[in-house]
Image (cartoon, rainbow, N blue to C red):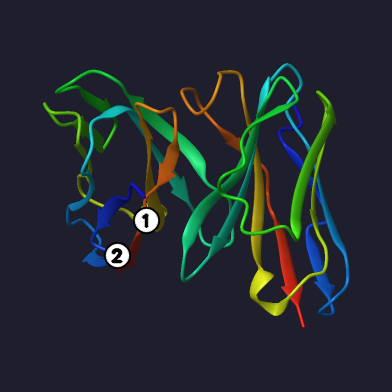
């Protein structure tokens, strides 16, 4: 079945460094959502992207949706310890099927 | 707003026993989702309901799993009989949009351990 590939699986960065996670699909997506899950917590919605080439910003977070609507990225500028957690993309394909990526686990080194 | 409520928060049971997980969605939300999360398989959608009707249950692993939504404010996920490989965190989420096109609000999850 369709898969949504998310890379990298793990990322360790020094506090203050930037971080990027990528989400890729083999098929065109209707929309894509991003969620953050803190250790021991539950996924919390961050944002939804719908339009081709869309870019949205939330403070230090920048979200992009590819022109072909097959990939997306989340970039965090100048990471802080509060950014620790796992970041998931969740894609909806044209059959209205929701598929979560495996997530990228972000560790911040002080 | 209390958010999505799940119970129990933790469950330890023995193989072969029946397990029932409960979920109360956010009032006014018309879509409800059940997910399972493990280290190996990540976050998997098991089933989702729209207006209390099951829309997509293709993620339900096998006949041992069943889900019901008798009314707009309550849903159950039942495993009978349970097996050790069912150990996972089970999340319930609700949304105001059909399918997954809107924001999903997740509950705190039920941590299930089957011995």
Residue displayed at 42% across by 43% down: A99
Of A71 and A109, nearer the camera is A71
Chain letter for mark 1:
A
What element does badge 2 sit on? loop
Residue displayed at 19% across by 22% down: A54
Left or right: residue B39 compared with residue A79: right
Q: Residue B99: give x, y in percent of width and height.
A: 53, 26
- Marks 1/2: CA distance? 6 Å
The residue indicated by pointer 1 is A103
The residue indicated by pointer 2 is A9
Residue displayed at 75% across by 25% down: B52
Asked if A97 appears above or below A6 in the picture, the reply is: above
**How would you rate the neighbour count of disc 2 (Cα within 10 Å): few for under 14, some for 14-19, many for 20 or more?**
some
Left or right: residue B101 compared with residue A19: right
Answer with the quarter of the image where residue A41 lies. bottom right
Q: Residue B90: give x, y in percent of width and height.
A: 66, 55
Q: Residue B47: give x, y in percent of width and height.
A: 62, 42
What element does badge 1 sit on? loop
Answer with the quarter of the image where residue A104 lies. bottom left
Q: Residue B16: give x, y in percent of width and height.
A: 85, 76
């Amino acid at each position: 079945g369709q898969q949504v590939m998310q890379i990298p699986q793990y990322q360790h960065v020094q506090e203050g460094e930037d971080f990027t996670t990528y989400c890729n699909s083999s098929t065109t997506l209707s929309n894509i959502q991003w969620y953050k899950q803190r250790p021991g917590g539950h996924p919390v919605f961050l944002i939804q992207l719908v339009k081709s080439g869309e870019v949205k910003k939330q403070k230090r977070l920048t979200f992009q949706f590819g022109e072909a609507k097959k990939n997306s990225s989340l970039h965090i500028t100048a990471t802080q310890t509060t950014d620790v957690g796992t970041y998931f993309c969740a894609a909806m394909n044209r059959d209205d099927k929701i598929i979560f990526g495996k997530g990228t686990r972000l560790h911040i080194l002080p | 707003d209390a958010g999505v409520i799940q119970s129990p928060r933790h469950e330890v049971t023995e193989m072969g026993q029946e397990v029932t997980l409960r979920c109360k969605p956010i009032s006014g939300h018309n879509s409800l989702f059940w997910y399972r999360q493990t280290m190996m398989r990540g976050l998997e959608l098991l089933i989702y309901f729209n207006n209390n009707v099951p829309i997509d249950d293709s993620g339900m692993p096998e006949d041992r799993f069943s889900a019901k939504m008798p009314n707009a404010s309550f849903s159950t996920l039942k495993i009978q009989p349970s097996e050790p490989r069912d150990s996972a965190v089970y999340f319930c989420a609700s949304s105001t949009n059909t399918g997954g096109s809107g924001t999903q609000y997740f509950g705190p999850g039920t941590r299930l351990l089957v011995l």
